[in-house]
Amino acid sequence: MHVLLLNQAFYPDVVATAQHGKDLADELVRRGHRVTAVASRSIYGKSGAVLPKTEDLPVAGGTSPIHIRRVGASIFGKAGYAARIADFALFYLLAFFKVTTTSRPDVVVSFTTPPFIGLVGIVNRWFRGSKAVYWVMDLYPDLPVACGVMKPAGIATRFFERVNRFILKHSDVSVVLGRCMRDRVLGKDTPDERVRMISIWSDTTGMDPIEPAENPVRAAMGIPAADTVVMYSGNFGIGHDAQTICRAMKRLDGRQGLRFEFVGGGKRRGEVEKYIAAEGLKNARWHEYAPREKLGPSLAAGDIHLISLKEGVEGIMVPSKLMGIMAVGRPSIFVGDPTSEVARVLTETSSGLVVREGDDAGLAQAIERLAGDAALRRQMGENARRALHGQYDADTACRRWVELLEQVVEGRGGRTVAAEAPGAPRNEVARAES
């Protein structure tokens, strides 16, 4: 079958959606399918067209390359909300033209960057007969509403909520990332039989629990092997809680042998850097994103990882960094609502701790607990790595994705892809296995 992946970011970009799209494309090609990816010529969040318009990317073990077709460019990067909307609008128009003039795909998989790009998949379904699959990475307008950017009852909010419900209703299948997201999507009157849950994942290649003294990334950062590193890796956006982490850092400033290392970017980066400078913190630094080939050693450079999600955002977005952390055998501390998918996975697998948003004292205590108990850190890390395999690894999740797409194209109904999250209702798994 011919599968078209539609997302603003794709290889060689390193943001999570680009990596997941590339993993899925690789698996589809290895299974003998043809893949076209339509994406932007810009690296996500940056301005300027730096990537070629067309690229045919070979896949090891595949029968054909991934056909990447890039359109337009970001003019403003992340200069502001109005600028991003302008960039989104340009991508919409050019992506719509590219998708509708590319040789007919059997199925269009639309991500959520930019928001509501799934409409392109719906139009292609109507006029060209392609199946439409909506990969719900984030929920809009739920996210900007939860973060205070849009008013809950505003005209724009009501309009975009109708658009999102329209996409969910008219897609052949909507794929959600976790149980809390599934509940939100079903709460929007989406037919139950059109919702599938396939977790985010980590590619386990090169993702090893490297010891501090043997880690080249840690050495390049100038971190002594004896120090305990608390790391935040990946995007730090509007849906994440920064202040609880910042205040906990201040509480722990001056603690011998403990340091905070931030790797990545996002809207909250400036907020965190300003706090570090204003408070004169000596225990915290920021680094740029690690390239994918160094992601394993970069994550393994941390002894304890932080993951945050503003309360009220659970089910609207699911941080993907958890699976990479699990792959390198490190424990996590999640700052957010204990009912969120990340908190539930950490609790069910005994691979980390959960602290509520605003409880900086509790977060500082949790950090000190793990920093002072190497045996507990190692046990939680081993639990995480063991839970990943067969559940949240790329091979397992991508196989579920390929099977789902094959079923959608073949027109087979019913729940035939098992829910992968621990604790999934037995009746759902039973239907999946039947």
Image: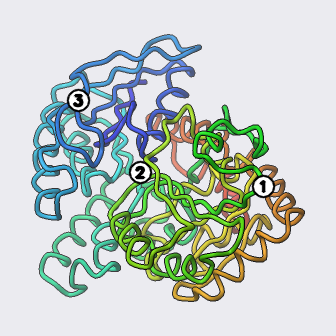
Label 3, label 1: how many angstroms apart (C-alpha)? Answer: 41 Å
Residue at numbered disc 2: 135
Q: Nearer the viewer, mark 3 or mark 1?
A: 1
> With 350 as the anchor, is 87 left or right in this view?
left
What crowding class fits label 3: few (fewer than 14 Cα within 10 Å), some (14-19), or many (20 or more)?
A: few
Residue 182 as seen in the image, left or right of residue 144: right
Residue drawn at (62%, 88%), measured in percent from left and top? 361
Where, by quadrant of the figure, is residue 206 drawn?
A: top right
Frontmost residue, 361 versus 255? 255
For the residues bearing labels 3 and 1, Cβ distance under 8 angstroms: no
- Badge 1 marks a residue whose secondary structure is loop
Who's the residue at 33% across and 78% down the image? 147
The spot of residue 23 in percent (x, y) is 52, 34
In percent of the image, x 38 and y 37: which residue is there? 13
On the question of residue 382 being in view, the answer is: yes
Using the numbered discs, state the Cα–Cα distance from disc 2 to disc 1 in whole angstroms: 42 Å
Q: Nearer the viewer, residue 207 or 391?
A: 207
Q: Disc 3 and disc 2: Cα gap in Å?
A: 26 Å
Residue drawn at 41 percent across, 56 percent down: 136
Q: Amino acid at mark 1?
A: Ala
Q: Amino acid at mark 3?
A: Val
Where residue 377 appears, x then y in whole percent?
81, 62
Which comes before the other along the chain, label 3 or label 1?
Answer: 3
Taking 307 as reference, is 55 above or below it? above
Ranked by sequence position, the earlier of labels 3 and 2 is 3
- Residue denoted by label 3: 50
Q: Position of residue 412 (x, y in %)?
A: 51, 42
Q: Is residue 56 left or right of residue 224?
A: left
What's the mark number on residue 226? 1
